Amino acid sequence: MSEQDGMDDWAAAMAEQAESEADQAEGVQAAELDELTDDAPISQEEKKKLDTILDIPVTISMEVGRSQISIRNLLQLNQGSVVELDRVAGEPLDVLVNGTLIAHGEVVVVNEKFGIRLTDVISQIERIKKLR
């Protein structure tokens, strides 16, 4: 088999795949969606609907890192034990709301209390993609 024959087989396979994809795409129509804009006015009815969900409590958590250990090792943990995490020191923390990643941040101390300064907020589009 010559190199030319190999290329012809490859070209034939690519053409066959393109034809197959074209057949599958036949009858498929692209959906027309409205663009999301921040400047769209909100009606009173929409504002009431939005107000209903604004007071729903959610759980926000900050994840420093994760580790998998056996139950045997878990039962051996005691005061002073160290558990190695999957992140390096200085790496941003994950900020999760109801288990969904929404941002990355860094630890800060404000008035002797720990807090998180958000350094990167995940876009709404990316969060919606992760829900699928």
Image (cartoon, rainbow, N blue to C red):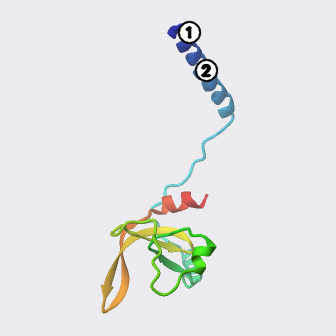
Image coordinates for residue 41, horizontal then vertical, percent? 47, 69
Q: Earlier in the sequence, mark 1 or mark 2?
A: 1
Residue 31 percent location from the top left of the image: 60, 46
- The residue under the point 53% across, 7% down is 2
Instruction: From this view, report whether residue 2 is shown above or below residue 13.
Output: above
Viewer-closest of 93 and 129: 93
**Residue 100 position by quadrant:** bottom right
Q: Are marks 1 and 2 in contact (CB under 8 Å)?
A: no
Q: Position of residue 11 (x, y in %)?
A: 56, 17
> Residue at image x 48%, y 63%?
124
What amino acid is labelled 1 in the image?
A: Asp
CA neighbours of label 2 inside 10 A, class few (<14), some (14 to 19), many (20+): few
Q: CA gap, disc 1 to disc 2?
A: 12 Å
Quadrant into which the C terminus falls: bottom right
In the picture of the structure, the residue carrying the numbered disc 2 is 13
Looking at the image, is mark 1 or mark 2 nearer the viewer? Answer: 1
For the point 55% across and 59% down, which residue is it?
A: 130
Relative vertical location of residue 28 with respect to residue 89 in this rendering, above or below: above
Residue where numbered disc 1 is placed:
5
Give SS at disc 2: helix
